[in-house]
Amino acid sequence: MALLKVLLLLGLGVSVNSDVSLQKRIIGGQNCDDGERLYHVRVESGNGTHMSRCVGSLIHPQWILTAARCWQFGSGWTIVAVLKVHPWTATQQRQMIQQAPVIYAHNGRHHDLMLLKLETAVRDVPFARIPDCNNRLKKGYVVQLAGEGATTTGPNNERLPPNAPIPAHLQCVDMKVSQVSRSLQTHGHKFLASAPSKDVCYGDVGGAAMYNGMIYGVISFGGTDACQRPTAILDVCEYLWWIKHTTGLK
């Protein structure tokens, strides 16, 4: 029951009918290189009628790092991790998440950070490297975000509709850190990033913010309104000890 209340407070991934994709996300991005972000994981939740999508990063043979709000709960809901979605191939791997998520908690409060454990270890996908926290992000640093949304808005500068198909290429976008060490009691330690005419939205939640080839952040949203600049990102360095303790990473 406690976990249920926590997830209600954190907010859920956006649920949609099973025959449509999520609202488009990346605005002002470009195709990611085929040799990067191989650790990108699509996190799909469904109950036969509704589905939602988030993003995660493979950081260990059996562990995916993502946002806590991506966990769907309730009777009939299942969650599946889809690996090898980038570059686009026919060899995607799907694993149903069988174990309960591990959500970060401190002083009775849960933060918007979660680890999902795979039943079968993955040996043929490169992992996202954990950060060098001796070199913390500073204001003005540029981080790379990614998602499966479209690169442009519609003809009248509106967002593309929910039924637009997922493009064949993962989209990458660079944003500049505008604020660091923003501590929010109910969601966690965050930094903010933004760039002119660039944005991320619902379905990109849980994705990696990369700097110098390492995962320094996990995309989150701190309020009821998403898709608004600047983008809120969980600061991985603030949770690195917990990640290492949970996963066994050195």
Image (spheres, rainbow, N blue to C red):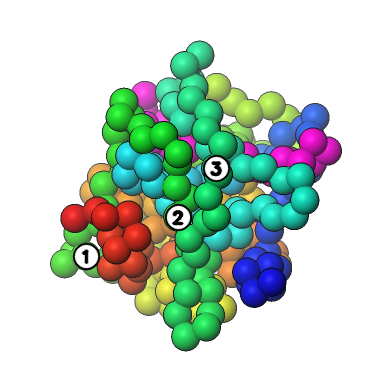
Q: Which quadrant of the figure contains the N terminus?
A: bottom right
Query: Can residue 6 be seen at all in this image of the molecule?
Result: yes
* Residue at x 53%, y 29% (from the top left corner): 94
Residue 67 is marked as: none
* Residue at x 50%, y 14% (from the top left corner): 90
Range of the magenta residues?
Answer: 30-52
- In the figure, residue 189 lies in which quadrant? bottom left
Percent x, y of residue 168 = 55, 22
Whether 69 is among the magenta residues is: no
Q: Say which label, 1 or 2, has the lower sequence index.
A: 2
Single out the residue that lies furthest toward the bottom: 107
Q: Say which label, 2 or 3, has the lower sequence index.
A: 3
What is the spatial separation of the Cα atoms under label 2 and label 3, in whole angstroms?
A: 11 Å
Q: Nearer the viewer, residue 217 or 172?
A: 217
Query: Can residue 159 be seen at all in this image of the molecule?
Result: no
Disc 2 secondary structure class: strand
Q: Amino acid at mark 3?
A: Ile
Q: Residues within 10 Å of mark 3 (few under 14, many from 20)?
A: some
Percent x, y of residue 42 = 54, 37
Q: Which residue is mark 1?
A: 133
Q: Which residue is mark 2?
A: 115
Q: Say which label, 1 or 3, has the lower sequence index.
A: 3
Disc 3 secondary structure class: loop
Whether 50 is among the magenta residues is: yes
Q: Nearer the viewer, residue 223 or 70?
A: 70
Q: Amino acid at mark 2?
A: Leu
- Tell me, yes or no, whether the two marked residues, 2 and 3, touch with CB atoms within 8 Å: no
Residue 97 is marked as: 3
* Residue at x 51%, y 71% (from the top left corner): 111
Q: Is residue 101 above or below residue 76?
A: below
What is the spatial separation of the Cα atoms under label 1 and label 3, in whole angstroms?
A: 30 Å
What is the spatial separation of the Cα atoms under label 1 and label 2, in whole angstroms?
A: 20 Å
